[in-house]
Amino acid sequence: MARSPTPLRLDPDRPLILLSNDDGIDANGLAALAAALDDLGTVVVVAPATEQSAVGHAITVRDPMRAHPWPFDGPTGPLWARAVTGTPADCVKLAVQKLLPRRPDLVVSGINHGPNTAVSVLYSGTVSAATEASILGVPSFAVSHCSWDPDADFETSGRVARTVAERVLSEGLPPGVLLNVNVPDRSFDQLTGFEVTRQARARWEEEFEERRDPFDRPYYWLGGQFINLDDGLDTDLHAIKQGAVSVTPIHYDLTAYDELRRIATWNWSADALSN
Amino acid sequence: MARSPTPLRLDPDRPLILLSNDDGIDANGLAALAAALDDLGTVVVVAPATEQSAVGHAITVRDPMRAHPWPFDGPTGPLWARAVTGTPADCVKLAVQKLLPRRPDLVVSGINHGPNTAVSVLYSGTVSAATEASILGVPSFAVSHCSWDPDADFETSGRVARTVAERVLSEGLPPGVLLNVNVPDRSFDQLTGFEVTRQARARWEEEFEERRDPFDRPYYWLGGQFINLDDGLDTDLHAIKQGAVSVTPIHYDLTAYDELRRIATWNWSADALSN
């Protein structure tokens, strides 16, 4: 027998907390996040119907989207949840601007299965969901568990997410700023603390593997390894290596302010225009 | 009769200029860009086989990609070109790391059909191609024509792209910094100059339109309008409104440096961890 959709019951005295992710609505990390935050407020879930890793800040502009009512068990009962046929950024847009009866007080995206550090922040759907919330004026953070082990245990990351959620709910965040949290793969008691960090300069060294199909036509698989080019002690990668939770404040103003003046000195005269 | 693929002939004395975009390899804006840059160096094209607007910095990690040899006419003869079954970021990765015999000296992405200003930079596949080049250490810029008119004329934007390409080839760019160029929709003689700008604070005010399918099930279309929240005279939006070309230096270090110190003062003690 199909379960009937869980109704959304708001409590005016409790924060409304929206969860999303990029691993999809059935991912273990999202269930662990819901369990960890359950007693902080009214927890609701709007997450992608299917895995959306590495989609970056993609949004769906050419097709309509569905938002399917979804069975989602929290630790104290079923949660109101919708599975959206779109990207993580779509989920947050649709939830905040259409599906929810009021603005959430907090958006948390995760728990991602794998780190989102250094330049990977750009590719991360997990981070983009939190970024979208920030664009819409809702305090938010992304949380990622630094392990690709298929049997990864999200308990430590859940307890960390709860701590960060409490801090953000009590301290607030400035407009346009969100937090990107990465949790080392170790037991909670083995964490060495929290470090407020910057994004390390690092990149993927891609190695595209060329293969041949049965008709001898080439195709390419993206592979490669992550290369840290940054030996700073204040980076996300360093904190995690030391066993600390990395908390990086990020924003979506991409302007390279340090370069404004220098580039303005280039020859931008009418002469330059006329060649 | 099928044309045989155009061979890639490098000239050691001329810069190698890679073009990409997000509107797809057959877009008029890309042809206009190739025509405008043709005499600055050896121009090659690696662009998405299909339109990839609003994909942000998505990359393809779950599927292999094809790179089809593609007929692409430049003003002085056919150009070496590949149509990739992936995103703009994929195209640049694959071109630089696999397809090209040497690193390009410049990557130019565009000419996008429509502006990429303010927060739209995050969603833009055009910008992500240039960002990917910067991550890989290649100087780059994105160029967008501020009109959605289906019959938009890219001649002005082409001349602007040529000017910026010359400047970047001669001046270089610092590591991790690229340029996001937006060109007003007016004739070249009507441009009021170049302005080096910052990304305006603005956002899309989404209005999701709910419709019902023939089975009375809801679906949602993303709609809405762009809202400028920023009356600064130094923004990309202001420059374009004044008829000037907007040149915004951007980077992909998203760290909100101004907030590092303040967030480090939050209670991140062991006590905070233990609740």
Image (cartoon, coloured by chain):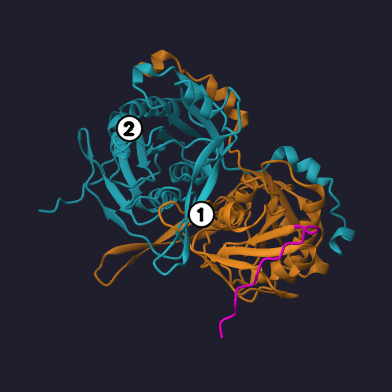
Chain colours: A orange, B cyan
Residue position marked by numbered label 2 in the rendering: B14
Query: What's the distance in space between the residues labelled 1 and 2, CA to CA?
Result: 27 Å
* Structural crowding at the residue carrying mark 2, measured as other residues with C-alpha within 10 Å and reported as few (<14), some (14–19) or many (≥20): few
- Mark 1 belongs to which amino acid? Glu
Rendered view: A180 above or below B173:
below
**Magenta segment:** A1-15
Q: Residue reaching furthest bottom?
A: A1
Q: Residue at x 38, y 27 (%)?
A: B185
State left or right for residue A8 relative to residue B89: right
What x and y, as percent, mark residue B68? 28, 55
Q: Is residue A75 visible?
A: no
Rendered image quadrant of residue A258: top right
Label 1 sits on residue: A205
Q: In this view, does A20 lie above or below B267?
A: below
- Mark 2 residue type: Arg
Q: How many labels does the image show?
A: 2
Query: What percent of the width, then of the height, locates residue A115?
Result: 63, 60
- Secondary structure under tag 1 reads strand
Report whether A262 appears left or right of B192: right
Can residue A71 be seen here? yes
